[in-house]
Amino acid sequence: MGHRRRRGRIRQVVLIHCVEDPYSAILRTISNLDALMLLSDVFDQLAVAEFSQHALGNPNGAGIRESDFATLTSHVNMGLAELHQRFPIKLAEVIVQQYEEIQRYELHSKFAVSNTGSTEPIKYIVDSDAFPFTDNIFNIEQVFNEIGEEVRLDDDHDELSVFRPSYNILQIPYAEDENQISVIYRAGHARLPIVDVDPTQLEVDIPPTHLLALLYFVSSRYFAPFPSLNGTSLSAEYFAKYTMACTELDKRGFSLSTSTTNLKARTNGWV
């Protein structure tokens, strides 16, 4: 049949980089942040700005109090989740083995080869113990076939197209036992623990360019239970600032771009 693609195994190497512009340099200068951002950096910024006039900011100059670490870390986790959903901050790859009898492939860890505790009869997610698939998926972004060609998504006019009926489901109308596909997906952040928190040892999974938006989101969440003063809600004010910060990031091109490098096809699988 004309639509069949056979054999050939090609590994997709995804390179991720931030698009820089002058706004990024300004953020780096003001925040004095390294490429590696720690939770303590976030807390420090909140203490000297958004929470500086509030007890949480510890106005005596000592910074965020340890007793408030768990509460704030929970809000930071929510902010990271929101930003990772809104912006393609992190992309990841998973290899899916096709089976002719299966058309709908749910990208869930119960179908992962590394999940020895799963009782699913067919495990089509080709991962490993070193790099297990952990359900950390927000959206399917791109798909590549076994010879390195990008497959069109959700295109009824292309007989080779695959479809996304859900954020983590890939429908392959003409699946073949011999073939695998590479799925590039938008991944979420590494969740921060909220017990025994040491902010100086926890990395925050976000670029410095998105820090301001995160600070505004955390502030909005924290002040949500507080009553309005003179008809003004601090939570609403900070959420409006968060929205504006995200819009500014969109306008200034702070998105992530991907490029793929095809390596030589090997006969012993994806390498």
Image: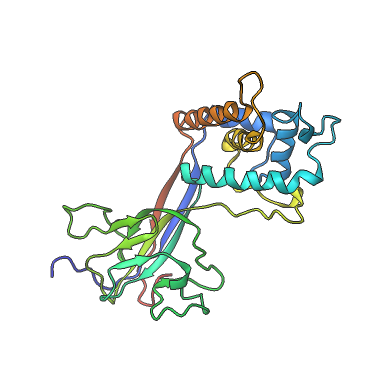
Front in this rendered view, residue 155 or 6: 155
Seen in the picture, residue 252 relative to 8 is either above or below; the reply is: above
Q: Report the number of discs.
A: 0
Q: Is residue 122 left or right of residue 84?
A: left
Seen in the picture, residue 147 relative to 191 is either above or below; the reply is: below
Camera sees residue 34: yes
Seen in the picture, residue 226 relative to 205 is either above or below; the reply is: above
- Residue 85 in the image, given as x and y percentages of width and height: 48, 46
Q: Residue at x 50, y 33 (%)?
A: 246
Front in this rendered view, residue 260 or 207: 207
State the quadrant of the C terminus.
bottom left
Front in this rendered view, residue 214 or 151: 214
Q: What coloring was used for the rendering?
A: rainbow
Q: Is residue 55 left or right of residue 161?
A: right
Seen in the picture, residue 149 relative to 233 is either above or below; the reply is: below
- Residue 73 in the image, given as x and y percentages of width and height: 68, 47
Camera sees residue 206: no
